[in-house]
Amino acid sequence: MNPETKQCQNCKSSFVIEPEHFAFYERIAVPPPTFCSECRLIRRLIWRNERSLHSRECDLCHKKILAVYPKDSRFTVYCPECWRGDDWDPMTQGTEYDFTKPFFEQYKQLMTAVPRMALNQNGTNMNCGYANYIEGAKNAYYSFSTIWGSEDVYYSQSITNSKDITDCTNVSESETLYQSIGGVKNYQCKFTYWSSNCIDCTFSIDLANCSNCVGCVGLKNKQYCIFNEQYSKDEYTEKLASCNLHTYYGQEEFKQLFHEFADRFPRRYARVLNCYDSTGDDLLNSKGMKDCFASADGENITFGLRVVGGCKDCMDVGYMGPNELTYEHGNGGSSQSQNLKFIAYGRQTQINVTYGDYCNASSDMFGCIAVKNKQYCILNKEYTKEEYETLVPKIIAHMSEMPYTDAHGRVYTYGEHFPYEFSPFAYNETLAQEYFPLSKDEAIVKGYKWRDPEPRTYQPTKKPEDLPDSINDVAESITNEIIGCAHAGTCNHQCATAFKIIPVELAQYKKIGVPLPRLCPNCRHYERLAKRNPLRLWPRQCNCGGPTSANGLYQNTASHLHHTDGPCKNVFETPYSPDRSEIVYCEQCYQQEVV
């Protein structure tokens, strides 16, 4: 079978369906998609609201709760305890399939009727009332996608099996980190990016097995280095003290120097470590991963995002634990599940589920919501095995005979994920805005919903510029102040305009010796997002020009044996677009330069 070029229904751009993609579609019995891979990803991401939280009551127990659904939401909303309890039955909302209406129209009616969980909290969690998308966590505060034994996590996102984490993104198996991104097995590090097995490192990029290094790039097995220069222990201690990193102005000055220094060094074409036959970024211990990001321990996954725990043979999946043979799955654990298709949010142990949301421990479901411990159900109505197997093929055929057309003219037949407009959330409340940011006008033109921020009535008692410069001068009374955010609501980062320092947060700042932040948690989060690579790949040639980088800014430290007579001719797919300023080396050239 040859590759086939199609035009995306949504963005109108051309995209290619490869022969191996067709083989997968045939294996799971779905037609090829009519949306490109990026638009399919956005369509799934708009179902994931992590951090836009609202105060309201649980509609069952009536206690005050936080929820991803505001008071004026059209949904019935239960707190996690009530939602998981036995005082309600989603099967009471079940309905027979109506062949006079499109499937998606019927599904939307069911979706409006079935109660939704206020926050996505699964497993056993302790003291996590201000956290969302968590599982097996303890003491998580305003943190999201925090899972599997994580403890004492504050203002962070995508944290796995880690402890004492503050203002971090995508770290695992680490302890006592601050303002770090993409770390594995690090301890007591600050402003450390895409590094592993490091101790007491600050303002560093791409370090491995280093300790007591500050302002360093691309080092391996080093100790007592500042700006990649080796010092004795005493010299290092003296010079580090002169940097005044415990003060806000000392920290900001050093940050600027560090970023200027880091731009003079080559970057690895992509962070693909211990992987075979894989493309993407932030990949670890995987095989056959294509166009995947922030994932680990997977095999034969195409178009994956934060797929962990041993997934195999999946396509178009995200935020998912160990699954097999899954397609167009947007969110949730769904561990040990098989043959899932078109899932908005998946929970545990599902088999043969198509068009589902929040279902748990069930099999052979079509178009169901919140059903648990059931089998052979359609639109939350239970059937016999024979009835189910007779009806489902008729519904699939009907979905093509009577497709659903959304308000923007996009046509949905069997084989497409849920329509954009079905998402309970506005575009700017979801991860779609984080990865593919739009202005309000741009979002509306594309047919996406938008939610204007609620009026802020906070009255700051302390201006950010009036905060103590040094953490050593901060009194415990700061926890009683309302601090104005330096952005003052002028950004597009869901700025809270003001924030408070909670006692455990202050204790953490004092413990690790960093000054108080001047931005609210949302603005700090978006500052970290700006440092991440996009979820896109571009074909490029290695920037190694022989003895120096192609732009002459970096002097190679070793002879690169695979191209001794001129520029490196290696080509690759990279998240660094051709118009970016970074020096990007292929894996071979990069490894030659790591000292």
Image: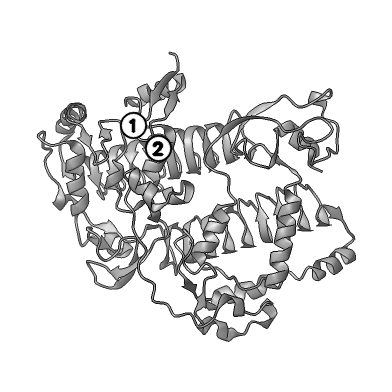
In the image, is 576 to the left or to the right of 256? left
Q: Nearer the viewer, residue 413 or 159?
A: 413
Residue marked by disc 1: 9
Q: How many marks?
A: 2
Relative to 238, residue 437 above or below: above
Residue 192: where, in percent of width, then height?
A: 67, 56
The answer to whether one can see residue 56 in this image is: yes
Relative to 500, residue 569 above or below: above
Residue 387: where, in percent of width, then height?
A: 14, 32
Relative to 18, residue 134 above or below: below
Screen quadrant of the N terminus: top left
Disc 1 on helix, strand or loop?
loop
Disc number for residue 407: none
Viewer-nearest of discs 1 and 2: 1
**Residue plotted at (34% across, 31% down):** 9
For badge 2, the amino acid type reads Cys
Q: Quadrant of residue 131?
A: bottom left
For badge 1, the amino acid type reads Gln
Alpha-carbon distance for marks 1 and 2?
9 Å
Q: Disc 1 vs disc 2: Cβ atoms closer than 8 Å? A: yes
**Residue plotted at (84% across, 22% down):** 565
Residue lying farthest to the top in this orientation = 1
Q: Quadrant of residue 458?
A: bottom left
Residue marked by disc 2: 39
